[in-house]
């Protein structure tokens, strides 16, 4: 049997199979990524419980209930209770160089796309957190949750935008999620955000209502937000290692002339590839590059004349086959 020549389809199939193995190997970088995601869950639990304590200290449950009663009785003029998932927490325990107390405050958003740096109006880092957190779910939808990490050093471009938009749509990004409107989020984002909404008094944006907390409580909120940023960083580091391997893989596969060379590479990498399976699902490679199949195909294309006797015999055989 003659060697099967490489073509684009075979290269892509080999590349995707080997890349899939790279992504599922138990490497140190992957393990750190998974551990950082588990730590995010732990931090979300403790930080959200603390936020509930701090918020209800400023907006007591009884007061919220009373105001809701007034709203029911008097309508819109008393509509001052709202649900929110992002808060300005502030403490006044630091001193400046003159010994005067100073206020330290920051914006903390518990939503899926919540900022990682205290900015109320920019959720770009929050998007990176979202795709890192829901990586498996997005991969299962045949999307590319690694696009931010893969394009980390590149400006926005059509390829990046296409994959980012697809991921954001799947996650339920509303395009305005960082303002805390619970009606904007849908799908996975809504499911993620719902547990973190708390009752606040005052309908203006959260920046106008800094909620008092202690310095220790503030530090715990910062620890939670740092954990989110660490997940993004660990995801970036892991994907960087895969990208470097895949870059070399592409170069090698492009240079190989025969399928057997690609399979040998996979074997050296400890990856078992079934050549028959690759060929069986690759009609172009099987038909064109296998000499016997190519000959059969060409012979079948020829216009052959039949004698009258051959036509009668063929008809007789056909009629007999019906009986």
Image (tube, helix red, strand yellow):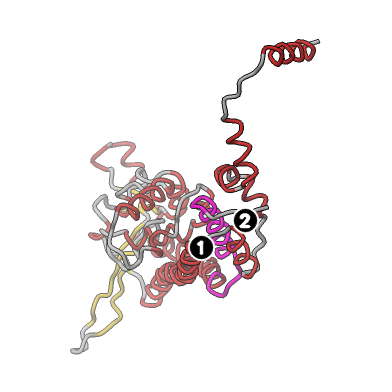
Q: Foreground: 119 or 153?
A: 153
The residue carrying mark 2 is: 3
| Residue at 43%, 55% in the rendered image | 196
Image check: 17 left or right of 99? right
10 Å neighbourhood of mark 1: few (<14), some, or many (≥20)?
many
Image check: 203 left or right of 36? left
The residue carrying mark 1 is: 253
Q: Is residue 69 visible?
A: yes
* Overall secondary structure of the magenta section: helix
Q: Foreground: 149 or 228?
A: 149
Return the disc, 2 or 1, that comes first in the chain's sequence.
2
User: Quadrant where the C terminus lies?
Assistant: top right
Image check: 21 left or right of 103? right
28 is higher (above) or lower (below) than 246: below
202 is higher (above) or lower (below) than 226: above
203 is higher (above) or lower (below) than 238: above
Q: Secondary structure at mark 1?
A: helix
| Residue at 61%, 65% in the rendered image | 266
| Residue at 41%, 44% in the rendered image | 186
* Tag in front: 2 or 1: 2
Q: Foreground: 198 or 127?
A: 127
Q: Is residue 17 magenta?
A: yes
Q: Secondary structure at mark 2?
A: loop
Please tell me in which quadrant of the rendered image residue 34 appears.
Answer: bottom right
Q: Position of residue 258 (x, y in %)?
A: 57, 59
Q: Are marks 2 and 1 in contact (CB under 8 Å)?
A: no
Q: Position of residue 181 (x, y in %)?
A: 33, 48
Part of the protein shown in magenta: 7-30
Q: Which mark is residue 101?
A: none
**Cα separation between marks 2 and 1:** 16 Å
């Amino acid at each position: 049997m003659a060697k099967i020549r490489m073509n684009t389809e075979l290269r892509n199939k080999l590349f995707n199979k080997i890349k899939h193995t790279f992504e599922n190997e138990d490497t140190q970088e992957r393990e750190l990524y998974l551990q950082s995601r588990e730590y995010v869950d732990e931090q979300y639990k403790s930080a959200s419980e603390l936020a509930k304590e701090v918020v209800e200290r400023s907006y007591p449950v009884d007061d919220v209930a009373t105001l809701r009663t007034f709203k029911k009785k008097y309508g819109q003029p008393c509509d001052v209770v709202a649900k929110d998932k992002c808060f300005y927490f502030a403490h006044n325990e630091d001193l400046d160089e003159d010994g005067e107390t100073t206020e330290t405050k920051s914006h903390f958003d518990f939503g899926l796309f919540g900022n990682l740096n205290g900015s109320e109006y920019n959720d770009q880092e929050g998007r990176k957190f979202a795709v890192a957190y829901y990586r498996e779910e997005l991969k299962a939808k045949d999307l590319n949750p690694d696009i931010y990490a893969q394009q980390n050093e590149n400006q926005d471009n059509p390829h990046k935008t296409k994959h980012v938009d697809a991921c954001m749509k799947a996650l339920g990004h509303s395009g305005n999620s960082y303002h805390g409107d619970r009606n904007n989020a849908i799908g996975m984002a809504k499911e993620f955000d719902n547990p973190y909404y708390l009752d606040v008094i005052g309908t203006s944006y959260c920046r106008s209502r800094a909620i008092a907390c202690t310095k220790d409580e503030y530090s715990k909120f910062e620890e939670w937000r740092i954990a989110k940023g660490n997940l993004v960083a660990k995801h970036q580091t892991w994907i960087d290692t895969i990208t470097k391997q895949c870059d070399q893989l592409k170069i090698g596969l492009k240079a190989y002339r025969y399928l057997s060379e690609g399979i040998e590479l996979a074997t050296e990498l400890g990856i078992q590839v079934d050549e028959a399976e690759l060929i069986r699902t690759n009609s172009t490679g099987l038909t064109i590059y296998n000499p016997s199949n190519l000959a059969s195909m060409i012979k079948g294309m020829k216009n052959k004349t039949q004698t009258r006797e051959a036509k009668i015999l063929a008809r007789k055989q056909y009629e007999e086959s019906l009986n």
